[in-house]
Amino acid sequence: MKRFFSLCLCALITISLCACGGGGTNGGNSDAKLVGVAMPNKAFQRWNQDGANMKRALEEKGYRVELQYAENDVNTQVSQIENMITKGVDILVIAAIDGAAISDVLKQAKANNIKVIAYDRLIMNSENVDYYATFDNEMVGKIQAEFLIDKLNLNGDGGPHNIEFFAGSPDDNNAVYFYKGAIETLRPYIDSGKLKVPSGQTDFAKVAINTWKSEVAQARMDNLLTAYYASGNKLDAILASNDTLAIGIIASLKNIGYNGTDRPFPIITGQDCDRPNVIALKNGEQAMSIFKDTRTLADKVVQMVDALLSGQEAEVNDTKTYDNGVKIVPTYLCAPVIVTRDNYKEILVDSGYYTEEEISK
Ligand code: BGC
């Protein structure tokens, strides 16, 4: 009898694994469906985590995973995707380095009947993108801007205050949305004179930082400090679209004597809750970041993979916003969350994202 029950149990487990895993049993079973996951680079903490979360979540569902990082080189990413197609992946999940540079390789995917999910970053100018899953990008910029409005008391008697802007990489479509959300929210205060931009640089093209690199942001900050703030002009706030930019900005400010005690930092924004930035939040160097729980995004994308591989439609909650130049890509938007010194414990530590030790110097 006992043996009968355990046989039934085994059969049940096998059936349920087949149902979710598209025919496979676990990561090692060559009958399991193969998911190609292409990530931009390993150098940034966020993509490391995204890749690892996606692999874990897919393998838990019984898929095999081909995960590749392209070290921010577009040609490398294109050939990685080509190799995935040759290897016979059943579906592709792609976080593009340059959203506009992979339309040719996606034609090959289409010719092989492989569905494509754009992960976090929209893939531009291609018919062959089936779905997009991301965090609400414009909302990220809006939350950053609203934080500055509040801290600078711009709706009260605060101002005029000096601010400078740092946006993301021009080849990343997200960078445009982050900046749009931020600048549109702050524009009325610039127009009314409550916010001043001593450099005069507010156009995306002027404030965009290539490849999102800390060093590039640091060099621009050095230039701004020399050109517009050397004669004692006070810099009150910096809108930085993400954490890697904030790191470069903080390094530049530290080099000229900002220390957070007798010389307090301007109010600096960020995004991603990278480890060094959470430490900077705790030390009062950076004022806020945005938490985009990559576990949530990975789970959402796995649901999409499940749906598409079983011939169903995937769940979406936005069918209007993300026009890639050829079509509007059906999208699932996850919610970004603000993190400050006051709530980081609750949001990041209590949720198990970091241990307190991981975010201590
Ligand atoms: C992501 C951000 C990230 C940036 C740089 C963007 O596409 O949405 O979370 O900070 O790339 O890696």
Image (cartoon, helix red, strand yellow):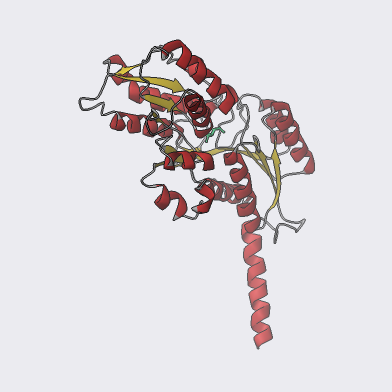
Foreground of the two, 356 or 1: 356
Foreground of the two, 284 or 351: 284
Q: Quadrant of the N terminus?
A: bottom right
Q: Quadrant of ligand 1?
A: top right
Percent x, y of residue 177: 46, 27
Judge whether 298 appears above or below 266 on screen: below
Residue 335 seen in the figure: no
Q: Which of the 4 image quadrants contains residue 23?
A: bottom right
Percent x, y of residue 190: 32, 17
Judge whether 93 appears above or below 226 on screen: below
Rendered residue at 76%/32% (across/down): 79
Q: Residue furthest bottom?
A: 1
Q: Residue furthest front?
A: 262
Rendered residue at 39%/35% (across/down): 287
Percent x, y of residue 318: 45, 37
Judge whether 13 appears above or below 340 on screen: below
Q: Is residue 319 left or right of residue 162?
A: right
Foreground of the two, 254 or 77: 254
Q: Is residue 278 left or right of residue 161?
A: right
Percent x, y of residue 158: 24, 25
